[in-house]
Amino acid sequence: MPAGTFAVSTSKTMQFSDITAQVQKAVATCGIADGVCHVYNPHTTAGLTINEGADPAVQTDILAALQKIVPMNHAYQHLEGNSPAHVMASLVGSSVTIFIENGCLLLGTWQKIFFCEFDGPRSRKVFWRVV
Ligand code: ZN
């Protein structure tokens, strides 16, 4: 079962990083033309999502909405001080699944796969597995 890891470096506290090309590269080199690609983020203050990649304002709007939903100033008990990032990571989720057809990710026209940083900047990693 083909599987692997790739690195994602983030440069801001909160940002979306388009990882579609890395996932497509993994799929293209794994030798499976038709199947399912699982992408998994092993970090507790980051997430993965699929959404519009054509207009960067969509990413900005999602981050702004998450910051509105999750209060920065709240009586959080977690002593590390990054509870909002943990909450956002749970809201977004830690994995995505994409169908593969003829060696290509079966994404919608406007869809991209995003690594969602909520507690950066950091060096992160992403796991993928094709079945
Ligand atoms: Zn923490």
Image: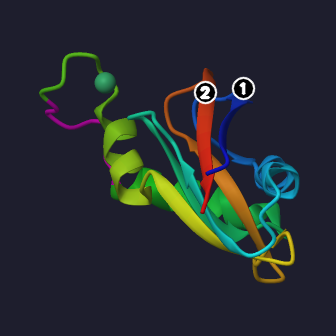
In the image, residue 13 sits, relative to residue 68, either above or below, namely above
Region in magenta: 70-76
Identify the image's colour scheme: rainbow, by chain, secondary structure or one colour: rainbow
**Mark 2 is on which residue type?**
Arg
Residue 96 on the magenta segment = no
Split into quadrants, the picture shows ligand 1 in the one at top left
**Mark 1 is on which residue type?**
Ser
Q: Quadrant of residue 78?
A: top left
In the image, residue 49 sits, relative to residue 88, either above or below, namely below
Residue at 40% in and 46% down: 89
Q: Earlier in the sequence, mark 1 or mark 2?
A: 1
Q: Is mark 1 within 8 Å of ligand 1?
A: no
Q: Is residue 59 left or right of residue 106?
A: left
- Provide residue 67's location: percent of width, then percent of height: 44, 50
Mark toward the viewer: 1 or 2: 2
Q: Which residue was labeled with disc 2?
A: 124
Disc 2 residue crowd, few under 14, some 14–19, many 20+, Cα 10 Å: some
Residue 71 on the magenta segment = yes
Distance from disc 1 to disc 2, alpha carbons, whole Å, reads 11 Å
Q: Is residue 76 left or right of residue 119?
A: left
Please tell me the numbered disc located at residue 11: 1
Please tell me the numbered disc located at residue 67: none
Residue at 79% in and 66% down: 53
* Residue 85 at least partly seen: yes
Secondary structure mainly formed by the magenta segment: loop
Residue at 87% in and 50% down: 29
Circle 1 SS class = loop
